[in-house]
Image (spheres, rainbow, N blue to C red):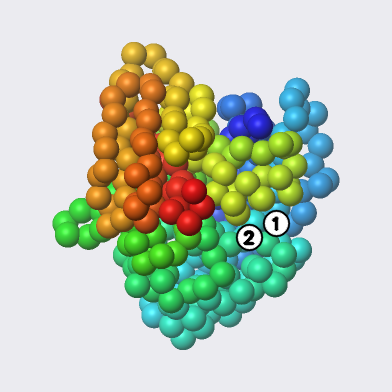
Amino acid sequence: MPWYRGNTHTHTTASDGNVSTAEAVRWYATHGYDWLVITDHNRFGPTESLDLDLDKPFLTIPGSEISMRSEKLPVHLCALNPRENPAFTAMPTIIQTLQAGVDRTRSLGGIPIINHPNWNWAFTDWHMAQVSDWNLLEIFNASTDCNNFGAGGRPSVEDLWDSLLTRGMRVYAVAADDSHEFGVDYVGHVSLPGLGWVTVRADELSTEAILDGLQRGDFYASTEISLAEYEVVDGEIRIQIAQWDKYVYTTRFIGAGGRVLSECYGVDARYRLRGDEQYVRARIHSSNGGFAWTQPVFRDDR
């Protein structure tokens, strides 16, 4: 099946972005993307009427970023393809607000993503572990102040993800732009497009196929790196990285508790599953500072 690159978190002038929906769509369509979700803060609008006369097929999916405050902290979720605006009144606690956001999105036929938990250090793996009926977590957000990588004794969002996986939850990792500013230089606190994305394996470029691929975890997240192939066959995880320029690559296969199980160098990486691992996922790092993350292979699915 082919791969389709897209962004799940995008803002326009309908909320606090600096370009129209049409301009945002055109930017992504002309920069190597295949699909895009529009997720303005507590706003929702259909995208079927967009007619941009693009020179290639491009899919625009309606969405919204549910943007609330609870316990004096920001609690945000993206709702992908709901039937209507999923906004609601925040609940007294962070856990209640997260659960209400998930439930509201699901009730409208949409798919929820829990966004940037480390923004303002808003909530932790403990909070998210109390929330049910969700399986997508934004582990990389290219906007400012999202503290993706942690520091100073604070966990990275990837650490939070490993904690949830180790608890037995099935959660898949998303990288996204959270784009607000188009056509500006990278100076100061700006949120630019093209810095984080997901690439979904699907049989066609349609809303149903892309969202189904996200829900079943048939995608990888990236800030730079593209995969030529990814498969799990004959008890082995096999990754082929698309070479770019003169970059070199390290792939770490990671299991329960965030423990590194194996490390490979080069564009071909393989891991032979022993059978006793709770899960195995891969993190790829380039010499240019880019990352890619594959989704966990769970013991029960082998």
Residue type beneath disc 1: Asn
Residue 81 disc label:
1
Dot 1 alpha-carbon crowd within 10 angstroms: few under 14, some 14 to 19, many 20 or more: many
| Residue at screen point 64% across, 68% down | 105
Q: Quadrant of residue 256?
A: bottom left
Q: Position of residue 173 (x, y in %)?
A: 46, 50
148 relative to 264, above or below: below
Q: Position of residue 53 (x, y in %)?
A: 80, 29
Q: Is residue 163 left or right of residue 45?
A: left
In the picture of the structure, the residue carrying the numbered disc 2 is: 111
Outermost residue to the bottom: 92
Residue type beneath disc 2: Ile
Cβ atoms under marks 2 and 1 closer than 8 Å? yes
Asked which secondary structure carries label 1, the reply is loop
| Residue at screen point 53% across, 79% down | 90
Dot 2 alpha-carbon crowd within 10 angstroms: few under 14, some 14 to 19, many 20 or more: many
Q: Position of residue 80 (x, y in %)?
A: 64, 56
